[in-house]
Amino acid sequence: MIKIEHLYKDYSKDIKVLKDISFTFEDGKTYAIIGSSGGGKSTLIRCLNMLEVPSEGTITLDGVVVNDPKTDLTRVREKMGMVFQNFNLFAHMDAKKNVAYALMKVKHMSKEDAYAKAKEMLEKVGMGHRTDSFPHQLSGGEKQRVAIARALAMEPEILLCDEPTSALDPEMTTEVLKVLKGLSHTGLTMIVVTHEMAFAKEVADYILYMDQGQILECSTPDVFFTHAKSERARQFVSNML
Ligand SMILES: Nc1ncnc2c1ncn2[C@@H]1O[C@H](COP(=O)(O)OP(=O)(O)O)[C@@H](O)[C@H]1O
Ligand SMILES: [Mg+2]
């Protein structure tokens, strides 16, 4: 599990984003983080794997304090896959190399094993027929599926997704959400920042509603979408639906 205690993140004296967040993400559950733009959703998710360094507080993963300067971040990041809004694929590598690269560099797999695993992972996300394509030859939805395969190939315990479908048109959004839905009951812990309310409702075990740097609510979709506690959350939901 990932435990966050009294987490603060300031980008500067004037830009204070996360304000005393404490929360525990349980193993194997799917969390949808929702809330208005600027509320700190990306900052929170990026703090989890130290793409942003928290200003105060602790993040503990399997008993290891992630933001302790003595912690080996490579080991931590091996446990956490990340999928970004803009895919972040390596432009000069084809799909299979995008997936195989970290297997060779970080997991020290042989080239043969890494490419075999890459093929297997690409098949899993329905991209088995495009293993030789470069990012510029793929649609947004296809790129995102390669990015998901790349994250999964590392066999993470946790998959962090920051608006994985925000750059996609509706058809591609559907194909990517289908892949994520398929992963939600595999034992993987998923933390997905999303504006897709139908997905959040259907797939998430818990909805986290973030506003102005705090988690205002955490409830099951049933409860959240019918009787959210705060007026702000109810307003947000009604604007989104
Ligand atoms: N690298 C940064 N430097 C300074 N301010 C930032 C940086 N990243 C985000 N912010 C600011 O932090 C606030 C929260 O941003 P963000 O975490 O991206 O929110 P969300 O993902 O919910 O839209 C915003 O006001 C944003 O402008
Ligand atoms: Mg964001």
Image (tube, rainbow, N blue to C red):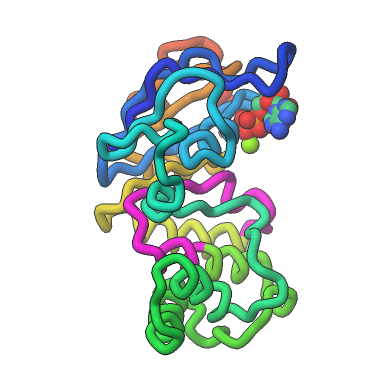
Magenta-colored stretch includes residue 169: yes
Q: In what quadrant does ligand 1 lie?
A: top right
Which residue shows up at 45% across the image and 65% down it? 106
Q: Read off the magenta span.
A: 148-170
User: Furthest-front residue in view?
Assistant: 70
Which residue shows up at 48% across the image and 25% down it? 209
Label count reads: 0
* Residue 211 in the image, given as x and y percentages of width and height: 56, 19
Q: Left or right: where does residue 132 sit relative to residue 127?
A: right
Q: Left or right: where does residue 86 sit relative to residue 151?
A: right
Does residue 76 lie above or below 214 as drawn?
A: below
Report if residue 205 is visible in the image: yes
Which residue shows up at 56% across the image and 79% down it? 97
Where does the N terminus fall, quadrant-wise?
top left
What is the quadrant of residue 65 in the picture?
Answer: top left
Front residue of this view, candidates 227 and 17: 17
Front residue of this view, candidates 208 and 160: 160
Which residue shows up at 32% across the image and 28% down it? 24
Front residue of this view, candidates 15 and 85: 15
Q: Left or right: where does residue 16 sit relative to residue 57?
A: right
Q: Left or right: where does residue 175 sit relative to residue 191?
A: right
* Residue 192 in the image, given as x and y percentages of width and height: 47, 43
* Residue 165 in the image, given as x and y percentages of width and height: 60, 52
Magenta-colored stretch includes residue 12: no
Report if residue 228 is visible in the image: no
* Residue 90 in the image, given as x and y percentages of width and height: 66, 68
Where does the C terminus fall, quadrant-wise?
top right
Front residue of this view, candidates 143 and 95: 95
